[in-house]
Amino acid sequence: MKRKSNYTNKKNKKKQGKTLTIILLISGVIMTGLLIGLGMNDWDVEKSIKKGKEAIGMSVANEDTTPETEPIELPGLVEQPDESVVEPDAGVTTEEDEPGKVQEVMPEQKPTEQKNPPSKPTKNNGAGSSTEVKPTPTIDNGGYIEGQVLPKEPKFVNGILLANKKYPLPATYAPGEDKKAREAFEKMAAEAKLADFNLNAFSTYRAFEYQKTLYDRYVARDGREAADTYSARPGYSEHQTGLAFDIGEVNFEQHFASSSFGETEAGKWVAANAHRFGFVMRYPKGKEQVTGYMHESWHFRYVGIEVADKIFKRNLTLEEYLGVQ
């Protein structure tokens, strides 16, 4: 019995060994086939599986060929340009004047505009008369008479040459710098030196053409209304008379053509002593409605010692002294 049992066990072990060998051979064949299939399909697993299914007759679902959905543009979500990027300024470049010339100062404050309503033409009540009465010339906001033609001769009042927004000069009037005015300035500058002030007349006579260049430049930059408060139109500038002197202090050019000159010690000295040499401050503070221009602490006009003394002591403008507008 014992021998029979041993024989049976050996027989079973041989069967199990054969079965395992067969399984290993089949597995090896399958693995070899898979590796060969992968190699033939560039090692693409999905492609190999697809072809394997086709080989055994299994249906393969078609690939989804639906095109990708285009993005939908929602209203109101359109990309806007970046407003934080500021374009460079078109550029206000610093312009240089002629050698020896200094630009007029930019307005620091504007005087109250003088608005005069247009004058109405007088009605003609004469029976049967066909004569028309011309309306009085109107004055615009800048204080100028609209449509006024430059005269052929300059305006003198009581022997004093006048140039302002109502009384222009001929375009051809070109006297150059006044010699008496220059002599008076040199005397004043010499006395100022004794007080340790080195004065300089940085802008005096200006020709009609040069004033036109300045004025047109200011209008292009700031507009006509603003320019009229600090710069004279060509033919209306006191500098064309040769009697106007823009005064400053040497080595303190930052105060040239600036109201700050009047706050300097040199500016205070000139304001208090210029009349003794025949000069008056042409556009004093608080008189903007009379002169038509902003206050200019640096702009002085030569009128002679006698007249200058009266104007200074009575705190008048040239217009007020002469009794004209």
Image: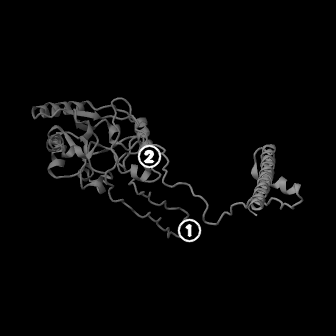
Q: Nearer the viewer, residue 166 or 36?
A: 36
Q: Is 144 located above or below residue 69 in the figure?
A: above
Image location of residue 294, percent across then percent down = 30, 51
- Of labels 2 and 1, earlier in sequence is 1
The quadrant in which the N terminus is found is bottom right
Question: Visible in this render: residue 172?
Answer: no
Residue 5 occupies which quadrant of the picture?
A: bottom right
Name of the residue lying farthest toward the right: 57
At label 1, counting other C-alpha atoms closer than 10 Å, the crowd grade (few under 14, some 14-19, many 20 or more) is few
Looking at the image, residue 197 sits to the left or right of residue 122; the answer is left
| Residue ID at (15%, 34%) | 197
Callout 1: SS: loop
Q: Position of residue 48 (x, y in %)?
A: 80, 51
Which residue lies at the image location 84% right of the left edge and 53% below the top edge?
51
Seen from the viewer's position, the closer of residues 224 and 130 is 224
Check disc 2 and report its element: helix, strand or loop.
helix
Contact between labelled residues 1 and 2, with CB atoms less than 8 Å apart:
no
Which of labels 2 and 1 is toward the front? 2
Name the kind of residue labelled 2 in the image.
Arg
Q: Residue 128 carries which label?
A: 1
Q: Report the side of 179 relative to 8 (left or right).
A: left
Residue labelled with disc 2? 221
